[in-house]
Amino acid sequence: MPNITLISPDQLAGQGEAGGFPIEQFPLQFLAQGDSWFSIGAIPPFLTSNLFDRMSLSRKAVAVNCARPGAELAHMTDSTTNAVFLQLLSGTLARRWTALLLSGLGNDVISAAQAGPSHPAHQRLLATPAEWGAGSDAARYLSAPGWATFADHARRVFAILLFNRDKSEVNRGLPIVVHTYDFVTPHNAAAGPGFGPWLFGAVKAFGIPQDDWAALGVELLGRVRSLILDIASTEPTLKVVDTQGTLTPAKTTDAGPTEHWQNEIHPTRTGYRLLGDVWERRLEEWFEP
């Protein structure tokens, strides 16, 4: 089966070359937007790949990729920073796409976890020791008001995305394919100088016992999965590739690449290939000939 051809918006427009990209030759034409799981997850970039690496379908497919590392879902839908994406979706550059492929909320939750103990409870995901409840459930390390804020933020941003999609008749009701994120374990493995680790510093700042870091990662990313599935349950055009549980989690003591994790929050090439296998099955199911 042919690999999905990945091109930039500039290539589609033909900037710097004659004629532009021959997108009409591809039966499946995807628009892609997202975070580092759709772009790069390490410095230098060749240390890892992304979800599109060697992803193949039975029919020829192309994805115009607007993703960039570190992007949060709120920024992806912001017309001031993602004008080209929105033009391709519902503006002057819009065409009828097969679907929008979206990798979102991963960077949002990692960013939200960076808010330190001095922030009010509704502005941080993690709870201070004084707020920890009784028992051994990892949920006690999360701020209930902070999670409510995050969930409300996610719902609002998805609503903005749907509004932007439906502004133009050409892509009104376009299928949007999103995915869940596998379990991230807080550990001291950066993506490069000055790039992470992210959760590792956060759990240390809140004094969370190391024995509970892995369980906290499961709780946090499990909640993100449930949130994505819940949002999709009320919007029939949102399709979810549920990949959570595919990869072997890193250990809290790991300080470098593991079998499936290149660094704290980005999979290895092997890990991405396993996740890509799940994507392939779902895309074939939803967009078969």
Image (spheres, rainbow, N blue to C red):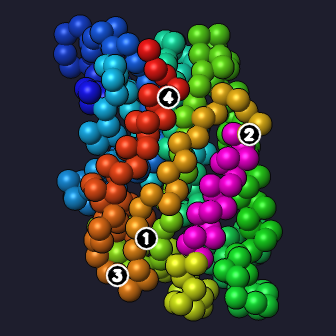
Q: Tell me if residue 231 can be seen.
A: yes
- Residue visible at 79% across and 71% down in the picture: 144
- Residue visible at 64% across and 33% down in the picture: 238
First-in-chain label (1 vs 2): 2
Looking at the picture, tell me which residue is in the foreground, 137 or 193: 137
Q: Are marks 1 and 2 in contact (CB under 8 Å)?
A: no
Give the residue type at disc 3.
Asp
Residue bearing the label numbered 3: 254
Q: Residues within 10 Å of mark 1 (few under 14, many from 20)?
A: many
Q: Where in the figure is residue 213, as x and y percent of width and height?
A: 54, 82
Secondary element under disc 2, as helix, strand or loop, is: helix
Q: Which mark is residue 249?
A: 1
Q: Residues within 10 Å of mark 3 (few under 14, many from 20)?
A: some
Q: Where in the figure is residue 187, as x and y percent of width and height?
A: 42, 79
Give the residue type at disc 2.
Ser
Q: Which mark is residue 285?
A: 4
Q: Are marks 3 and 2 in contact (CB under 8 Å)?
A: no
First-in-chain label (3 vs 2): 2
Residue 219 counted in the magenta span = yes
Residue bearing the label numbered 2: 233
Residue depth check, mark 4 versus mark 3: number of the one nearer the observer:
4
Q: Where in the figure is residue 43, as x and y percent of width and height?
A: 26, 60
Looking at the picture, tell me which residue is in the foreground, 227 or 247: 247
Q: Disc 3 and disc 1: Cα gap in Å?
A: 10 Å
Horizontal side of 98 relative to 124 (left or right) equals left
Q: Are marks 4 and 1 in contact (CB under 8 Å)?
A: no
